[in-house]
Image: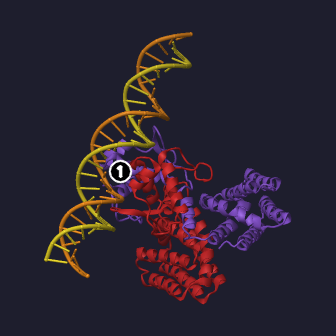
Chain colours: A red, B purple, C yellow, D orange
Amino acid sequence: MVANRSMMPEETNPGLVSAAIQAITQYIRVEGLGPGDLLPSEADMTRRLSVSRTVVREAFRSLSAMRLIDMSAGRRASVAKLDIGAMSMVIEHGVTTEQISVHQVYDVRRTIEMRTVALAALRRSDAEAAEIQEYARLMRENYRAPEIVMEHDIAFHEAIARASHNPVFSLIITAFSGVTRRTWVIGWRTRASVEDQIKMIEGHADIARAIIAGNPQLAAEHMAAHFDKSVKALTDAGIA
Amino acid sequence: MVANRSMMPEETNPGLVSAAIQAITQYIRVEGLGPGDLLPSEADMTRRLSVSRTVVREAFRSLSAMRLIDMSAGRRASVAKLDIGAMSMVIEHGVTTEQISVHQVYDVRRTIEMRTVALAALRRSDAEAAEIQEYARLMRENYRAPEIVMEHDIAFHEAIARASHNPVFSLIITAFSGVTRRTWVIGWRTRASVEDQIKMIEGHADIARAIIAGNPQLAAEHMAAHFDKSVKALTDAGIA
DNA sequence: TGCCCTCAACCTGTATGACATGTTTTCTTG
DNA sequence: CAAGAAAACATGTCATACAGGTTGAGGGCA
């Protein structure tokens, strides 16, 4: 009654905690819970699964770390809204342990953003178009302050992903933001002249205009050019 | 000394466990640990962080759930090799709680696999080419047994992702496999005639041949055609 | 000497009980 | 009937205990 061993592809490494995690996710599925819905209390789960509260807590904690559930003191756990959480930690872990290179991340980003930008050009609402354009404007306005440009740059790409109206794209792109934060400034510094830096910012404005114009081909072309330049900047900086 | 509040983008929801998680990941980073390297024992961490073993354990457990570290009874935790773990759970959670649709997953897969298949055509080793071809062959050989075809289908796509030699692609594609397992059979059933089913399997053989021939354009075209047919099959089956 | 076996030391897995603190519900009181 | 206090319930953290897995040191045997 506690765990299933056959159907799920998730490896059940032996142990009560893993079984409890399975049981809880299965509970969410079976009960058809959606974001915000409450889960049984730890004491409840302790009784249902016939294990100690220790085990139940570690299971809840694990799900909370992956952002599948929300926990806070005093109130019961609830099903979480879709969130990066775990995914970004996995990516960062891969990069810091040198199992993933920054170039590889950029290739994935390029692949995905060529699509999100085209979708955004087709599907963006007016509000989304305005938001994207606003980030491009803020980049130009703050071109003397790299850190600020970076944050608007990241926000720009995330906004495009949102405007694709596919949350999975949004999820993945946002997961990469952490890595971007660690390498962005390096790429910026290799753009020796102010003209180069401004040219890079104008690349964003080009993308924004194509999205607003509803031209997916043009938007994708500008995005490709942008990534090619960014990757070149990183390569020039000696980042593998 | 335990946690940092400023640099990391990860939201530090208050609590000793979150702080411990931060401390442990930071430890991995600072010590420059790679896959397989051992972490301090729970007792050690208890002393270092001046918190109870309960807290340390919940932190370790959380990292283990995200597959950032490996744990097993009797031996100390170690840094894990890059693995899907959390990512696939996030995706599955999104789908079961209806925050992500199957179509959206397929759009992302299509976007990524158009790239992995092209990269595979350019970069695959002979062994990888043989493996990919073998899965296509196994699909044909077992065409009467849908479940077996499905497993080889999934293995086929994962093998292509591996042959792209970019682990991030591999990571993402594998993360989607769980969702695929839940919907594959439905798409299969809508292919009414045996001819249609065989045609679908032949689509995989076409992809394999293009990869072996080292022709990225052709490979991408076949992949696109394959996905278009798959999505149509799902749509015909009434999957949103 | 060299190999195998045993056992001690260390480690994680699970259970239990206790108490602090935060949240919700209920009931009392004005 | 409303406001506020208290009880009931929830999670957060700690301490302790013991079972069972892992490893390496040391000793016995060939």
Query: Residue A88 or B189: which is nearer the viewer?
Result: B189
Residue B176 point in image, percent of width and height: 62, 62
Front-most of residues C13 and A207: C13
Side of B20 relative to A159 (left or right): left
Residue B29 visible in the snapshot:
no
Crowd class of label 1 (few under 14; some 14 to 19; many from 20; radius 10 Å): many
In this rendering, the answer to whether A122 lies above or below B80 is: below
Looking at the image, which residue is at 42% across and 51% down?
Answer: A46
Chain letter of mark 1 equals: B
Write the residue at 61% across / 71% down: B101
Query: In the displayed structure, would residue B18 be above or below residue A136?
Result: above
Q: In the structure shown, which secondary structural element does the residue marked by tag 1 occupy?
A: helix
- Residue type at tag 1: Val
- Outermost residue, right side: B195
Residue tagged by mark 1? Answer: B55
- Residue D22 on image: x %, y %: 49, 34
Question: In the visual, does A54 lie left or right of C20?
Answer: right
- Residue D1 in percent (x, y) is at 26, 82
Can you give x and y, in whole percent of width and height, for residue D23 in the image?
47, 32
